């Protein structure tokens, strides 16, 4: 499913409607479910990215059909996913001007190859901007200094820029896998936060950014001091 014109969406809806007219009476019992598998976490960090959508169950066999409209709670329809002729996979092309926020794939009709209606699921996709986190470190005797930098993807310039954001420095002991909080911080307007503390042993460190209503969380690479 690529970005669709109104005419293309209308044609898809009409094809599903045609399948509905060919379906058995309303008294026919629906026993199967047609499921859409779509990514939940969708990150906008480049001008365009293709995601794969999958329809499963009998709607994807022997000429079945199915469709879902992608709905934003305040902006309404943002396209959709439509499967015909028993197809089980479609492309979802997400451009960086896509609406931000939690979207629901609302069922618009599903039928098996004999035009029997099927129930459908309603998965969600949460679309937010990408972030980037950098970390640098130094040690002077037993004093460790950490510097974290926060960046956010700009849809206007198709690049990342430094900005103020909330995050935290984390550590893990050498040879372990569990990250622990060291200090919560807010970067300045230049996107930078710094901390120093005394610790004589060697540890791994990273800088993490928190999820916001418009951006996803992110962790930096690891530095060792």
Image: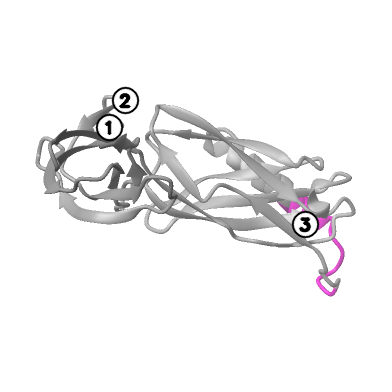
**Residue at point 25%, 37% (across, down):** 225
Which residue is labeled 3 in the image? 20
Could you tell me how far apart the alpha carbons at marks 2 and 1 are, in whole angstroms? 5 Å
Q: Which of 80 and 212 is in front in this view?
A: 212
Q: Out of 22 and 216, give the one closest to the viewer.
A: 216
Residue 183 at x, y percent in the picture: 19, 54
Regarding mark 3 in the picture, which secondary structure is present there?
helix
Q: Tag count in the figure?
A: 3
Extreme-bottom residue of the structure: 27
Nearer to me, 37 or 187: 187
Q: Position of residue 204 (x, y in %)?
A: 32, 42
Residue, disc 2: 158
Q: In this view, does 60 lie to the left or right of 175?
A: right
Say which label, 1 or 3, has the lower sequence index: 3
Report if the CB atoms under discs 2 and 1 are less than 8 Å apart.
yes
The range drawn in magenta is 17-27
Mark 3, Cα crowd under 10 Å, few <14 / some 14-19 / many 20+, is some
Q: Does the magenta stretch include residue 52?
A: no
Tell me the SS state at disc 2: loop
User: What x and y, as percent, mark residue 12?
Assistant: 66, 43
Which residue in the protein does label 1 denote? 154
The CA distance from mark 3 to mark 2 is: 43 Å
Choose top left, top right, bottom left or bottom right for residue 122.
bottom right
**Element class at badge 1:** strand
């Amino acid at each position: 499913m690529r970005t669709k014109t109104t005419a293309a969406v209308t044609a898809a809806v009409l094809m599903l409607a045609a399948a509905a007219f060919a379906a058995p009476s309303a008294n026919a019992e629906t026993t199967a479910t047609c499921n859409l598998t779509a990514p939940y976490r969708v990150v906008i960090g480049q001008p365009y990215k293709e995601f794969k959508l999958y329809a499963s169950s009998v709607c994807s066999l022997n000429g079945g059909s199915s469709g879902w409209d992608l709905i934003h709670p305040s902006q309404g329809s943002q396209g959709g996913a439509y499967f015909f002729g028993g197809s089980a996979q479609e492309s979802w092309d997400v451009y960086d001007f896509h609406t931000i926020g939690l979207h629901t794939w609302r069922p618009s009709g599903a039928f098996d190859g004999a035009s029997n209606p099927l129930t459908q699921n309603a998965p969600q996709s949460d679309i937010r901007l990408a972030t980037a986190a950098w970390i640098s470190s130094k040690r002077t005797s037993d004093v460790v200094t950490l510097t974290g930098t926060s960046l956010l993807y700009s849809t206007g310039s198709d690049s990342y820029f430094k900005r103020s954001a909330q995050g935290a420095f984390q550590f893990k002991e050498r040879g372990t896998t569990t990250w622990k909080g060291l200090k919560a911080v807010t970067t300045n307007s230049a996107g930078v936060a710094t901390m120093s503390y005394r610790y004589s042993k060697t540890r791994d460190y990273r800088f993490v950014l928190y999820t916001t209503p418009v951006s996803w969380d992110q962790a930096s690479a690891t530095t060792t001091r």
